[in-house]
Image (tube, rainbow, N blue to C red):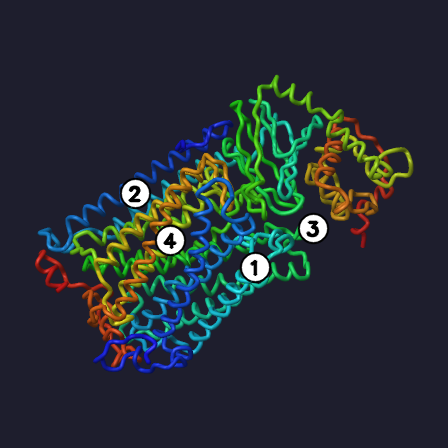
Amino acid sequence: MPLFPVPTEEENNYLNSSHTVASWLLTTDHKRIGILYLLSILVFFVVAAVAAALMRIELVTPQGDLVSSETYNKLFTTHGVLMVWFFLIPSIPTVLGNFVIPLMIGARDVAFPRLNLLSWYLFMMGGLLALHAIIIGGVDTGWTFYTPYSNAYSNTHVIEMAAGIFVAGFGSILTGLNFIITIQKLRAPGMTWFRLPLFIWSMYATSIILVLATPVLAITLALMSLERIMGIGIFDPKLGGDPVLFQHLFWFYSHPAVYIMILPGMGVVSEVITCFSRKQIFGYHFVAFSSLAIAVIGFLVWGHHMFVSSQSIYAGMVFSILSFIVAIPSAIKVFNWTATLYKGSITFETPMLYVLGFIGLFTIGGLTGLFLAALAVDVQVHDTYFVIAHFHYIMVGGMVTAFMAGLHYWWPKITGRMYPEKLGQLAALVMFIGFNLTFFPQFLMGYLGMPRRYHAYPPEFQIFHVLSTAGASILGAAYLLPVIYLVWSLFHGKQAEANPWCATGLEWKTPSPPPKDNFDRTPIVTEKAYNYPPLNTATEGEANHA
Amino acid sequence: MSFPLFPEQASTTAGRVDHLYLALTALSVFVLALVFVPMLFFLFKYRQGTKADRSPMRISTMRVEVTWTVIPLLLAMGIFVWGAHAYYDLEVPPADAVEINVVAKQWMWKVQHQEGNREINELHLPVGQAVKLTLASEDVIHSFFIPAFRVKQDVVPGRFVTEWFRPTRVGQYHLFCSQYCGTDHSRMTGTVYVMTPAEYQDWLARGSLGNTLAQSGGRLFRTLGCSGCHEGNGPVRAPRLEGLYGKLVPLQGKQIVRADDKYLRDSILLPASQITAGYEPLMPTFQGHITEEELFQLIAYIKSLANQSPVRVRPPNAGENGKGESP
């Protein structure tokens, strides 16, 4: 019996070539590994979302009445750890990246298919360790594991949780390595660097960060755990250590990690916005190099998380100016995407709606980043709901929206089925409304001084929390909808053609779903990316789409 | 339920921070308009099926790209300078600031006034007077946040940190711990009472414990046995502390440091780390033997000696200037 419903009269494709459980769990096919990741991150997402839902219900009233403060602290730790390391960081890279990178560059697979499978196993081992730590009692340090609380004061399962992140980190490093080498060495003949789709550029930049930053996280968590077990005295001031050193090391990874969580989304946006405007991207080189600029400068701004940490005020100024500079490449991307729409022939399928939502939410997220980079304002909003709102605009408004865009865009390619368009558009719209209602009030209460990680709070903040919880309910429904109709589409969706969007790009030149080896013959590339035929009149625009 | 958008402005920095915040908000609205007005226009005009001119663009891409790179960069640099300037003033206390000591521990704020008054989770202040807080933590990192003053400072264990403000309005304001510190983090809150100077004097008198902070420190100085070496006319084993605070001190190894709060803290807790030139490293560490509150009292006592004339004594190894240095 097939584990996965497959189109019936199709010839052999990657889904129906074999059906056993072992053929999935021991697969080295990048497409099947992408699906393994999709199913696993969905599990982590659900657990983390339930934690968020409980917190939002708790916060409807100012008193801490639904759960105890210990439980509340464990809920936000669970939410943060699972969402960051087991959903956001793997989301686009390991699901969509795994699936489409080889297809986009005209390769049969990634450079090291077995290593790719090992990455998934490492990810799952890490994830199960983390889940186990949560089930046997949880962790109350917050996802940031600040010392000396984490190494000397917390009585929870800190080491097991850190071990989970540590192990999953090796999965990240190997995935990054695999992608770099794949993009470097396996491009089809004629696929020069400047003919690459921009998704590939952004995945390349992401992979560099994964490889360079993740080891620092591993070292930091290992030192923290060693200190907890043996009291080696790196971070604990009672042993002569420096707790602020932990913050430097942690953010040296975790700020670049923010870009791991947004660059792949930017890649999806470039693919989708060109496809649904039927147009070459505006400023290809600028969009491509801005990804690399973000990856490089992103390594130099970690200290902006520490403006009130007692770090030197002059260090604060250096980190502030660099943080303003790192905003510029993101702004360049937004301007180029807008200009891409100019003289296009625009349609509003679900992926395009998500991308338009992305541009709006990401722009707000980016602009509020300027508030946080501005030293004197950061002093007020640091560790308040303003920060929560800011990074949710980037990570949920940005990355999750882009992930939804990419998932819908490549769904026909991945499954061979079309999703129901009207429901897709509806979900995108509801998600946008629910998201803004959830997180916009948090900017306002953040500036008023509502601190983050508070289980109970003064009553004057209640109005904002009530709005936020109302928004979260809408957002929850909006996430449920795609799960339902996407599963439905596997069985009842219209069969997808090879290229349902009339998009450019090699992934659309092979059947949907692709054969096991991707292409019958190695494709030869002779044109630049997004080489949509010129549009002169409205009728021609329509002809293209038909 | 009310729907406020700004916290109360109750300090001299509050207005400055709010101006920058408003400027950033205006800039954000402007940039959003700059992106979304054209975007919505394009989405409408160039939607599929409309009769619009879609002939190839005749724009110099380079010129457009440079424009929308350079202008935002310049704006960002302007905001940077503005924010950094206000931050500098917000971090560096003025000379006329009076000092209050705060000890953070899971999950309370313990305040010690120089006059000897103590309070927990409350902070009484006179309006108009610049106040410099010196803060220490007994356990984990906490953060001392008064939204109405627009000030916040992490209190990192193992060191002193400072934070200053000048309250401008009589009233009651929230005090929050804003750095997550464990189970009852959200209950580590308090109230700041800003009073007229007369009321404040009244409050000080009512709550007086009879001893100033320095007097408590002096008593501690004798009970802990510090006075055995640092005072009296016996054999000279340790430097005298009269007139020490704020002066430059020559250390072994030809280093010279200023005798500030940090120096005194380190000298008491980690005496071996900085030996005054000419003395033997005889002093035992007091790490783990005294609380942060006692440390503040000792330092207040040593500070109270700052204006006394130094007692000249000849160090035991005078002239050698750092034994470790000799070959």
Compared across the picture, whether B47 is left or right of A269 comes to left
Few, some or many residues within 10 Å of mark 2 (<14, 14–19, 20+): some
- Secondary structure beneath label 1: loop
In the rendered image, which residue does mark 1 sit on? Answer: A137
Pair 2/1: label in front: 1
Mark 2–mark 1 distance (CA, rounded to whole Å): 45 Å
Which chain's residue wears label 4? A
Which chain's residue wears label 3? A
- Give how far across and how far down residue A233 sits, in percent: 67, 56
Report if the CB atoms under discs 1 and 3 are less than 8 Å apart. no
Q: Nearer the viewer, residue B317 or A382?
A: A382
> Label 1 is placed on what type of residue?
Gly
Does residue A135 sit above or below B172 in this rendering? Answer: below
Residue, x 23% and y 59% (percent of image)? Answer: A274
In the rendered image, which residue does mark 2 sit on? Answer: B32
In the rendered image, which residue does mark 3 sit on? Answer: A238
Which chain's residue wears label 1? A
Pair 4/2: label in front: 4
Mark 4–mark 2 distance (CA, rounded to whole Å): 19 Å
Few, some or many residues within 10 Å of mark 3 (<14, 14–19, 20+): some
Compared across the picture, whether B122 is left or right of A143 comes to right
Q: Are marks 2 and 1 on the same chain?
A: no
